[in-house]
Amino acid sequence: MLSIVDYLRLTLQCTAMADSTDETVPASKPEVFYNYRERNKCSPEENARLERQHFWNVINAFKYYRIHVHERVNRAERQFRCLPDHHQQLLTNFLPNLNKIGYCVDRNQEVLQAIVHNCLHMFENMEYGQDGDPRKVRPSTTFDMDKLKSTIKQFVRDWSEAGKAERDSCYKPIIEEIQRLFPPDQCDVSQVRVLVPGAGLGRLAWEIAHLGYSCQGNEWSFFMLFSSNFVLNRCDKENALTLYPWIHQFSNNKMSSDQTRPVSFPDVNPQSLPADSDFSMVAGDFQEVYSDPEMWDCVATCFFIDTAHNVLDYIETIWNILKPGGVWINLGPLLYHYENMANEFSIELSYEEIKAVILKYGFVLELERESVPSTYTENDRSMLKYLYDCIFFIIRKPAEQLINGDQTPKDGQTEDSLQKRSST
Ligand SMILES: C[S@@+](CC[C@H](N)C(=O)[O-])C[C@H]1O[C@@H](n2cnc3c(N)ncnc32)[C@H](O)[C@@H]1O
């Protein structure tokens, strides 16, 4: 599997990326600035080649969607036509429903086309050239098609009225704690720097910026980046667009119409940020991008830490980039992303183990809830639902660091620091 994590590293700093040729966006409109960073593992030429290839593979996946899902619909029709005539006659709604699914696929494709239409130049410091004949579409992998379908569902979670309950269960607790820890009536929130790694389609980061905090989202998936760029920079009318996120689900539907029900987005105008807001998105691998120490007052992770190959790397990065006295707010499960991927490195730890490591680094646990129920891109009409019993914690990097200078805890020092804290 080709992963963009493998070849991303910082290149340039962020500048405005207004696209004056895009008629849908008046030039005066505030833009969320996307900044591109790449990792340098192989030669720069090889990096650039792999990255370009991955970029165009993802664009191709957006274009191939329609063909892929129509093939699935055609299969359903072929199998229906294999039924004995008297069975077919009993299922009068079957083919009309398939026609409706086909219609929804085409509407989804229109939105996907709009998403990729403007992403060629979305990174202010990176261009991807051409990919042969832009009209030619190649078959995409099942892996990429699954990613695209998940991205479509992510629009429900982040930018629809239907996703409100889900957002309330996991974004709201984080936002409330940010407001409690950095109260608007006691500090200049525009000076409070909040980082949201693994920002998905950007709603949590957007909400934090909407409250006036300085907020940066970080994300490495091009599927997510293209889509968040579209919502944040190209959409300015509430519920003006429609997706059919559930058409790929042929099982566990209570009613046929559940599969084809529409979801409108965005439920809020993403352009309605305060005029002076400081909101940006940075593309790239969290660990690679964020190496500058003591930059952030708050790191907010939601359904993110289990995306690590080694969650200790994330803990170490967060320790390094937090200012002394800064806080890490985390909510999510531990569904380790790489656990079942062949040839991928993956360390799976229990929360108990993670917590012990966090304390060994010198973080101080300020709040802990071990059972916060939450869903993830849930289809509320489905007969199959997953409920995550999430961990929610707030930990603080002490203002006065116990491990002077050296950020890596040594065994003896760490035990000392823990004893020191427990005896106070
Ligand atoms: C489960 S999703 C959660 C998204 C969002 N926080 C939410 O709650 O909806 C995890 C996100 O982290 C992103 N991600 C995974 N590994 C990453 C990394 N190393 N650096 C930046 N983003 C990463 C994924 O692309 C994905 O969008």
Image: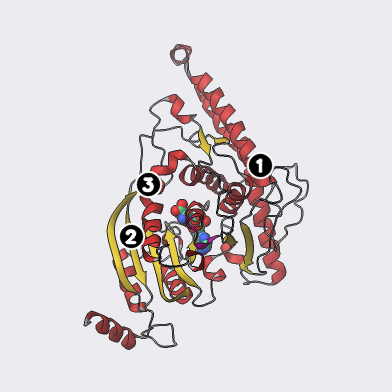
Quadrant containing the C terminus in the rendered view: bottom left
155 on left or right of 50: left
Residue 52 coordinates in the image, percent (x, y) = 69, 58
Q: How far apart are marks 2 and 1 (CA)?
A: 37 Å
Q: SS at mark 2?
A: strand
Question: Which of pointers 3 and 1 lies earlier in the amino acid sequence?
Answer: 1
Question: Mark 3 packing: few (<14 Cα in 10 Å), some, or many (20+)?
Answer: many
Question: Which of pointers 2 and 1 lies earlier in the amino acid sequence?
Answer: 1
Point out the residue furthest to the left here: 423
Residue 401 coordinates in the image, percent (x, y) = 38, 83
| Pointers 3 and 1 in contact (C-beta within 8 Å) | no
Question: Mark 1 packing: few (<14 Cα in 10 Å), some, or many (20+)?
Answer: some
Label 1 belongs to which residue? Answer: 114
Q: SS at mark 3?
A: loop
Query: Mark on residue 375?
Result: 3
For label 1, being within 8 Å of ligand 1 is answered no
Label 2 belongs to which residue? Answer: 392
